[in-house]
Image: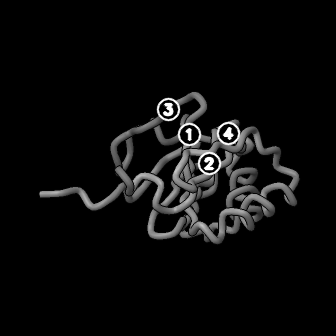
Amino acid sequence: MNIKKIKETCLYVKDLAESKAFYHGKLGFKVIGELEGRHVFFRVGSSVLLCFIAEVSEKSGTLPPHFGSGHLHLAFEVEKEQYRPWKQKVQNLGIPIEQEYNWGGGFLSFYFRDPDEHLLEIIMEGMWERG
């Protein structure tokens, strides 16, 4: 038995409208679910990014309560040919790039923050498939 992949990743945010403006409006992720005052969900390739208001999702309901705090890290994988266009897009949006890193073997990534200060990374496809 093998797990195929991580299907969903969750971030806890302060302002859903601000998160939607960033992830959908700026990065272009498709909104696939939204409940005002609770959550907004985005399609990211074959995965899903869930953004919740922690104070709301920690209450019991239809699903088990879940919540968190602090600044988290996510990496978004792009085809090698799309790496530079993504870097340019982020720069053109006025989003500061904190660092670019050379992982060796021709693999690069760069880091930036969302409105809640979560650390986001764009990384070239194939990085973790070697070795």
Q: Earlier in the sequence, mark 3 or mark 2?
A: 3
The number of numbered discs placed on residues in the rendered structure image is 4
**Residue occupied by mark 1:** 73
Q: Residue 68, labelled with which disc?
A: 3
Q: Nearer the viewer, residue 57 or 121?
A: 121
Camera-side mark, 3 or 2: 2
Q: Secondary structure at mark 3?
A: loop
Residue 83: percent from left, percent from top: 66, 63
Q: Nearer the viewer, residue 65 or 45?
A: 45
Q: Earlier in the sequence, mark 1 or mark 3?
A: 3
Residue 68: percent from left, percent from top: 49, 32
Residue type at numbered disc 4? Lys
Residue in the picture at 52% in, 53% down = 105
**Where, by quadrant of the figure, is residue 36 drawn?**
bottom right
Mark 1 neighbour class, 10 Å CA radius: few under 14, some 14 to 19, many 20 or more: few
- Residue 129 shows in this picture: yes
Residue type at numbered disc 1? His
**Residue occupied by mark 4:** 14
Q: Earlier in the sequence, mark 1 or mark 4?
A: 4
**Residue occupied by mark 2:** 121
